[in-house]
Image: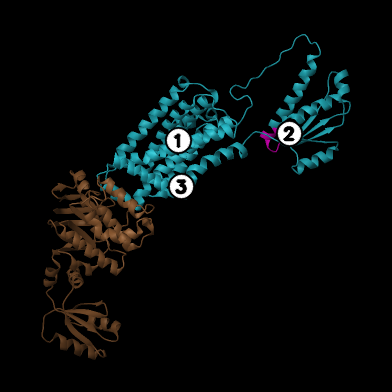
Chain colours: A cyan, B brown
Amino acid sequence: MKQFIVFIKKEFAHVLRDRRTLLILFGLPVVQILVFGFALTNEVKNSRIVICDYANDESSHAIIRKIEASEYFDTEKITLSYSDIEKSFKEGKIKAAIIFPLNFDNDLQHLNKAQIQIISDASDPNTGNTINNYLSTIIADYQRQMMDNIKIPLRVTTEIRMLYNPQLKAAHNFVPGVMALVLMLVCVMMTSISIVREKEMGTMEVLLVSPYRPILVILSKAVPYLLLSLVNVATILLLSVFVLDLPIVGSVWLLFLESILFIITSLSLGLLISIRAKTQQEAMLISMMGMMLPTLIFSGFMFPVENFPLPLQIISNIVPARWFYIIVKTVMVKGLGFSAIWKETLILTGITFFLLAVSLKNFKKRLE
Amino acid sequence: MVELNNIRKTYNKGSVLAVDSVSFSVSEGELFGLIGPDGAGKSSIFRILATLLLADSGTASVNGWDVVNDYHKIRNNIGYMPGRFSLYQDLSVEENLEFFATLFGTKIQENYHLVKDIYVQLEPFKDRRAGKLSGGMKQKLALCCALIHKPVVLFLDEPTTGVDPVSRKEFWNMLKRLKEQGITIVVSTPYMDEANLCDRIALMQNGKIMSVESPENIIKDYKNELWAVASPSMHTLLSDLRQFELTESCYAFGDSLHLSFKTKNENNRTETLQYLESRNQREVEMKKINPGIEDCFISLMQQ
């Protein structure tokens, strides 16, 4: 037991004395959360648009006020010719233009029908579409307000509720994804590198020729990284609550327990890599290529798994991050309890036992 | 104490033969040296004895324990210092020693008398990280770490390679003192001059053992007469002597050439000098010398 503690102390010394390791360990989650939170978002915010109000009447003003109130747009009111609008588009200054024709209010009041033109830059189709939708929604909203004053006998309105994420915040999607990614990277890469480093530096030879059991060497490597990873989980959760305004709806304890399970899965994967790899570079490459890419692609965090062709969907089943992603989303965003995620937990446990069994079977008590 | 019987070891699925039916035994309290150039198979033998590698065939035991079946007992009771510096470079001198002491279930104080002589020299640097020590200091620290649990046998794989001559001398003095305390030591080295410091040595070449004897006996077994020859023009001297019909072997050794003849003959010296004169060699010095371990090694290698 004393040996175990000394060994863990030594592991902590390795981590704390190597600035690069420290940076990866604690800088990575913060950077990822911030990058995904503020830079790599597919929400359209603060898009510059111009409004050409030829009508300049009551209705057009009302609509413009609504648009200006929205956080999605930076509006600029001008009365320009069409050719100027086109020039602004070409220079990339604006994302969309809204044009109110003359007699807008008049047409609306007397003909019960008026037109607004929305021109948007569709060179990025997603952004173009999103802006169109936002604008149409705002205009439709105004229309509904007007109709409330008039009696129309039969009317069907759809009431849309976006469950769990009413504001359609991207954070709901990527925080669980980043959590899976960071834990995977830290646990798999760091453990495999630290075990392979002992091999590469020759210290493994000395450790093997000692009363300390080889299997304990592995265990005492796992414990420090388990603890450090929990610090990472806490950092990510704190950042998402306080910086990204994404509350944890479900039980924090359940979230931590499930994280521990996923950390153990990742640690056993790191162990398996360390048994195969001979050099630190090799270990790093396998963990980067073999773990990071599948985690990004197959976890459902970037691309929905349902969109994959069948063979890829089957492959995604063996990616542990996929199940952890579902678990975190369920607990953190939907706020459901264990009964909603027992199946995913069971699969993750199964994968962990399988990985542990394979690595223990391949574990060598000698050099070759 | 240490026994090897027909140990054979190959690498890369049998394509590289590293150790070729090696047998020798080391008795208790002996300082035993494995002498041979790089690639002779010394490290492989050490790793087999330290239970880190499995031999292809043959048996070996340490203190009566079989290296395959009783590997756990061996690991508990031997000290092993690999050829490469194998301590934690980012831990300090003291932390390294403490770590290995605890790993072996002991304390520094308990066996301090064993490492005292060595550790005294390290003490001024005890807070320095091991990676920042000089080559000689590193090896001393590694020796301390291998000794701290009072092993019955100490396996030192090339402990003085890459260490300056003064530190090498100090290191061997330490080994002598450890031997006096009753610890059996098996040490390997590529330096022939260190062979004289061992009780017995095994001369190794290409995975084979050529001779196992005490250094004195190995020198005694050298049958030929050995001559040191020197002249101002050493390069032509060497090629001239190699072409000489009486020469058995001739090689450069320090600032002279070591020469041996095919037959023992009173007239060897005069005939050689006459021959050299005919080849226009001036100011030739030639005197009889006693062979060293290296001369024995070279002569064994040529057999």
The chain under label 1 reads A
Q: Which residue is mark 3?
A: A21
Circles 2 and 1 on the same chain: yes
Secondary-structure class at tag 3:
helix
A340 above or below A169?
A: above
The chain under label 2 reads A
Crowding at mark 2 (Cα within 10 Å: few <14, some 14-19, many 20+) = many
Pick whichever, A354 or B71, lies toward us. B71
Magenta-drawn stretch contains B278: no
A309 above or below B11?
A: above
Residue at 11 percent of width and 80 percent of height: B264
Q: Amino acid at mark 3?
A: Thr
Secondary-structure class at tag 1:
helix
Q: CA distance from mark 3 to mark 2?
A: 42 Å
- A292 vs B83, left or right, is right
- Stretch in magenta: A120-128
Q: Amino acid at mark 2?
A: Phe
Q: In the rendering, at what x and y percent does residue A102 appear?
A: 88, 28
Q: Which residue is mark 2?
A: A73
